[in-house]
Image: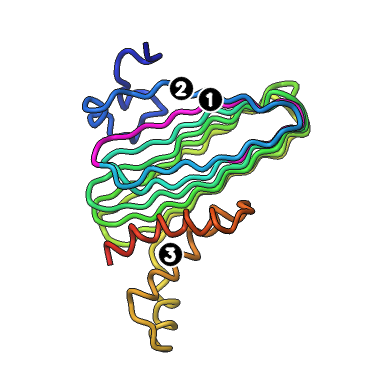
Amino acid sequence: MSELATLPTRKDEAWRYAAVEALAAAPLADWRTIAVAAGETFHECLTIGDSEVAEVRRLRVSVADGARCELFGVIAGAPYARIEVEVTLGKGAHFEMGGVTVGGRDTVREFVTRVVHAQPDGTSNQTVRSVHWGQGTGNFLGNIDVARDAQKTDAAQSFKGLLLEKGASVNAVPQLEIFADDVKCAHGATVGQMDETARFYMAARGLSPEASRRLLVQAFIGDAFVALNDDDTRERLMRMALDKLDRHL
């Protein structure tokens, strides 16, 4: 049986901006458990594409001492889509995540993370980019918890939202809970519109408005995949996100 026998509501902090009403038509997914052994590296790409029903993916990951976990994802489909990740880091472990949400109409797409630095010397980095239009919404809710013994923790979150049309929205809720005193934790969140100066510059050099916008969006979401070393995989994820934009142009 699922851990959540009853559906969540927006009173739950982690579901504050979710389209919880969409979950009535699709059962909440159970947690998938992943254990990364000491010194090992785990890598996975998570995508939600052209789906017409709500989709929720939930991962609970433990990263042992000196191990590394890398997750990259694109949410570009489903009326409501959510990728939720809980990560617990051992000593000297690292968690890397890059995520992109794109969409229009009245869709809601979100990444929700909780990273627990349980032991010393752990590092984590999360980069999420959201591009939305119409009445589309992109969300990032990210918790970083640093335990009392987790000295020398170095954790970072970066979220940026790009609104292509009036009516679209993005929401960012970064949260830090720190009990250690020798740590470095940083988070940043910005929301803006297309750089019209850059678009004018490109137009003056013969690029169409559609091509200009595509190039600017490509540069914007590319930040989420900087740490991805596989060029083919990076290209596939970029193409998935940009194809959604192309259908809107």
Q: Which residues are magenta?
A: 52-70
Q: For residue 60, which numbered disc appears in the image?
A: 1
User: Left or right: 226 with respect to 247?
Assistant: right
* Quadrant the C terminus occupies: bottom left
Residue found at the far front of this picture? 232
Task: State how far apart marks 2 and 3 are (Cα).
Answer: 33 Å
Q: Which residue is identified by label 3? A: 217
Sequence-wise first label, 2 or 3: 2
Q: Residues within 10 Å of mark 3 (few under 14, many from 20)?
A: some
Secondary structure at badge 3 equals helix
Tell whether label 1 touches label 2 (CB within 8 Å). yes
Q: Residues within 10 Å of mark 2 (few under 14, many from 20)?
A: some
Q: Residue at x 33, y 74 (%)?
A: 210
Sequence-wise first label, 2 or 1: 2
Sequence-wise first label, 3 or 1: 1
Q: For residue 77, which numbered disc appears in the image?
A: none
Task: State how far apart marks 3 and 1 are (Cα).
Answer: 31 Å
